[in-house]
Amino acid sequence: MSGAVLIALAAAIGNLLQGWDNATIAGSVLYIKKEFNLQTQPTMEGLIVAMSLIGATVITTFSGPVSDMLGRRPMLIISSVLYFLSGLVMLWSPNVYVLLLARLLDGFGIGLAVTLVPVYISETAPPEIRGQLNTFPQFTGCVGMFLSYCMVFGMSLTPSPSWRLMLGVLSIPSLAYFFFTLFYLPESPRWLVSKGRMKEAKQVLQRLRGREDVSGEMALLIEGLGVGGEVSIEEYIIGPDSELVDNQDEKDQIKLYGAEEGLSWIAKPVTGQSTLGLASRHGSMANQSMLMDPLVTLFGSVHEKLPEMGSMRSMLFSNVGSMFNITENQEKHEQWDEESQKDDEHHMSDGSGAESDDNLRSPLLSRQGTNAETNMGPPTSLSMRQGSNLVHANGEQASMGIGGGWQLAYRKDEKKEGALKRIYLHEEGGAGSRRGSIISLPGDAHAEGEFIHAAALVSQSVLRAESLLGQQSIEEAVETQSDAVTKRPGWKALFEPGVKHALIVGVGIQILQQFSGINGVLYYTPQILEQAGVGILLSNLGIGSDSASLLISAVTTLLMLPSIVVAMRLMDFAGRRWLLLATLPVLLASLIVLVIGNVISMGAVMHAVISTISVVVYFCTFVMGFGPIPNILCSEIFPTSVRGICIAICALTFWFGDIIVTYSLPVMLTSIGLGGVFGIYAVVCALAWVFVYLKVPETKGMPLEVITEFFAVGAKQAARE
């Protein structure tokens, strides 16, 4: 996964520049208002700071649709150029109006980076570490803030601090960002697939994943173009084919191959209701609030643990990357695979065509024939088989791991000629260890009567059965129907139930994040701390109040870094929803303490200490949850076909809220004071906790395409209720 990690780090430099700018303007505005005599003009002071937000809002209006047309990478390149130009103009700025223009250009660069970097990372990251990688922007943003505060603090100690130099230094790191975006970052593979550029998408995925075989993920990306149709939740039992095989129902069975020699497995749909399935999927229904969105429970069922039922504990979907063991058994069966490669190719269907190195390699997890004797022998590792089809000429179905413990399988649609059903399989409440394989079961797990229960999202595939039957690879199959697969959706797609539901979650959490006051506090941290009297803390060292507030701001951002590291570790383990529900109460408590410290009369030193500690706790708690997670969620919950438009809507909400908070904060500090401002933010944080509890689902470890399918089925379920 090193390729995806390095790509995410390079893209996150755009957020480092945003953090750099936020801290620089927060420190330099102390000197700007002195030079331009703005002490009595809080409106103009607020406009200088907010002008970048206005620019970000304007550019965001176009960034989503334009990135859907041109790609994510060109927009990030443009962002780096805008950062560079704005830094040069700010370095020159002869008057306040030129400074406003420079801040506008800076806002254009910020808007593109903040909007598209999370989308880019989500579209390139594997599901297992997507949350961790999407925390990089928060981390690099804080690194930028820390470095900038250190620079501004150092300059503040000089006899004549230059705010122009403080702001103009932005051009230097922006050159590094330009280099990485132009020469290192590839285009998003999901965007390439949406444009029918399958070979390019395959090459990017191979680079990101560090392996040749990416056919499973390619199939997933293609299926992501057709979200929003009829989706149903079905239940399957997975067990040895010797126990589950039923010739009468053979058309509904999906044959799977595991990692043990001589063992094949069958996924068979459950008729009626499975007791285990009901317990897992609806177990939390009895405890949920009447107001809780059914979608939250639906997502939560994926992450709940199964009840312990004897050796059932050993039968969980325990491999995050795939149902099937790829690495642990690869060495064990390497010799067998090499010896049997020619024999396997001989068993290929006649319609598979000639092999080519340019073709995608599809995993063969289902061999020809239907009886156990024909299928004896070890399964093939996903990375070691080539030239097979997902649906074979004799009607058998195959499957492949798509990350996060999910499996993509296909079966013919008996009700619609030539159509395929796509099936996303997942063990009911799968919560096993994150290593091993569902198929690599201990010996006692093979006993008669013990099976694995799996939930499945079943919907119409964008591919046609005849395409896969007549083609050797997914790539060729899609090219034969590329116009239908990559057809650009209209605005009416925004009114699909799943998309509307996702927009409610995305827009709602962005509004609450902004009105919790974080960006206003970030921009004005030095002034807030100065008003709180932090200069008293450092007066004995001979440091002035301006420099003292900048120094404490730098220390604050430094303390935020380990908090973000903790969030990185928990993002894909505990999950996004858990982090929000756990950190918002701490955030609320820090705000309440800050309000009390400013309402109750106390000594100057005690007041400064309480204010400083409260602000530090506020920042450190915020960056663990409410800081990165809204952008992460918004980059995950929308279908590929309308992701750019939906992200633009959420980003516009973000920037409008940012403008209102930032522009109004100087006025609010003057009118109601520090205690009143933080009191308002505390109320918003309380409302945010309620919103998260009732409306925000858990998306950790799930492929993006599966998340959007869940929103589609969950929205329709909520509408029926």
Image (spheres, helix red, strand yellow):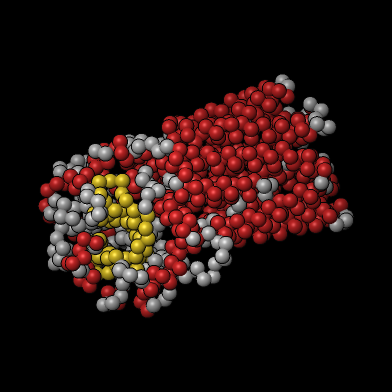
Q: Furthest-front residue in view?
A: 720
- Could you tell me how many numbered marks the image carries? 0
Task: Name the spot of residue 100 as percent of width and height, x first.
Answer: 68, 26
**Can residue 599 be seen?**
yes
Q: Locate residue 316, reporting x and y percent.
A: 37, 68
> What is the residue that sits farthest to the top in this orientation?
94
Residue at 49%, 63% in the rendered image: 297
Q: Residue at x 69, y 40 (%)?
A: 660
At a point 55% along the width and 43% down the height, the residue shown is 650
For residue 413, side relative to residue 114 (left or right): left
Front residue of this view, candidates 18 and 306: 306
Image quadrant where residue 427 sits: bottom left
Residue 194: percent from left, percent from top = 37, 39
In the rendered image, the vertical position of residue 586 relative to residue 176, given as above or below: below
| Furthest residue toward bottom | 310
Q: State whether residue 544 is above or below residue 676.
A: above
Q: Quadrant of residue 137?
A: top right
Q: Is residue 382 above or below residue 82?
A: below
Looking at the image, residue 147 sits to the left or right of residue 39; the answer is left
Up-down relation of residue 73 to residue 433 (above or below): above
- Nearest the viewer among 339 and 530 is 530
The residue depicted at 48 percent of the width and 58 percent of the height is 718
Front residue of this view, candidates 719 and 617: 719
Q: Is residue 575 left or right of residue 25?
A: left
Viewer-closest of 554 and 293? 293
Horizontal arrangement in the rendering, residue 309 relative to residue 166 (left or right)? left
Residue 408 can be seen, yes or no? no
Image location (x, y in percent) of residue 133? 49, 49
